Image (cartoon, rainbow, N blue to C red):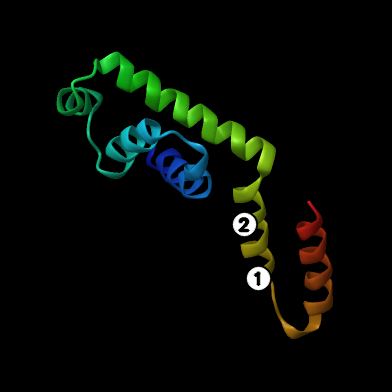
Amino acid sequence: MTLEKKEIYNVLFSYYENLLTTKQIEYFKLYFFLDYSFKEISENKNVSRNAIFLSVKETVSLLEEYESKLHLLEIHNLRIDLISKLNYENISIIKEQLLLLEEK
């Protein structure tokens, strides 16, 4: 998995963490935040390596599914883009676009 992908999953996790189970959160944090291997997690938690792998894989799929339905990261990125374009001449246009985003 590329570093860019990991960063995306970390951001998605920050948005959707509350929709995950306790174990999904725990295994995700160990794998993505603390950079533990599946083997290290399985040894520490007395769970099979495959169970850890499947849990992390399912969590990543859920994060992608939540984003595809709720678009929180997409909206955040659009806001950042709009803010970066902000200047006095186009404030009214940006306000209109932000209002349209709020309606999503």
The picture quadrant where one finds residue 82 is bottom right
Number of numbered markers: 2
Q: Position of residue 91 (x, y in %)?
A: 78, 78
Residue 8 in the figure: left or right of residue 103? left
The answer to whether any part of residue 1 appears in the image is no
Which residue lies under the disc numbered 2? 76
Which residue lies under the disc numbered 1?
Answer: 83
Q: Which mark is residue 23?
A: none
Q: Position of residue 66 (x, y in %)?
A: 60, 36
Query: Left or right: 31 with respect to 85?
Result: left
The amino acid type found where label 1 is placed reads Ile
Of the numbered discs 2 and 1, the one sitting upstream in the chain is 2
Q: CA distance from mark 2 to mark 1?
A: 11 Å
| Labels 2 and 1 touching (C-beta < 8 A) | no
Image quarter of residue 53: top left
Q: Tell me if mark 1 has few (under 14), some (14-19) or many (20+) residues whose alpha carbon lies within 10 angstroms of its own.
A: few
Q: Is residue 60 above or below residue 87?
A: above
Q: Residue at x 76, y 59 (%)?
A: 102
Residue 43: tell me if it is visible.
yes
Name above or below for residue 11 compared with residue 41: below
**SS class of the residue under badge 2?**
helix
Residue 40 versus residue 92: which sits nearer the camera?
40
Q: Say whether residue 87 is left or right of residue 43.
A: right
* x and y, in percent, of residue 68 in the image: 65, 36
Label 2 amino acid? His
Label 1 residue SS: helix
Residue 67, compared with residue 85, is above or below; it is above
Residue 83, x across and y down, in percent: 65, 70
Q: Residue at x 32, y 40 (%)?
A: 29
Task: Answer few, some or many: residues within 10 Å of disc 2's Cα (few below 14, many 20 plus, some between 14 and 19).
Answer: few
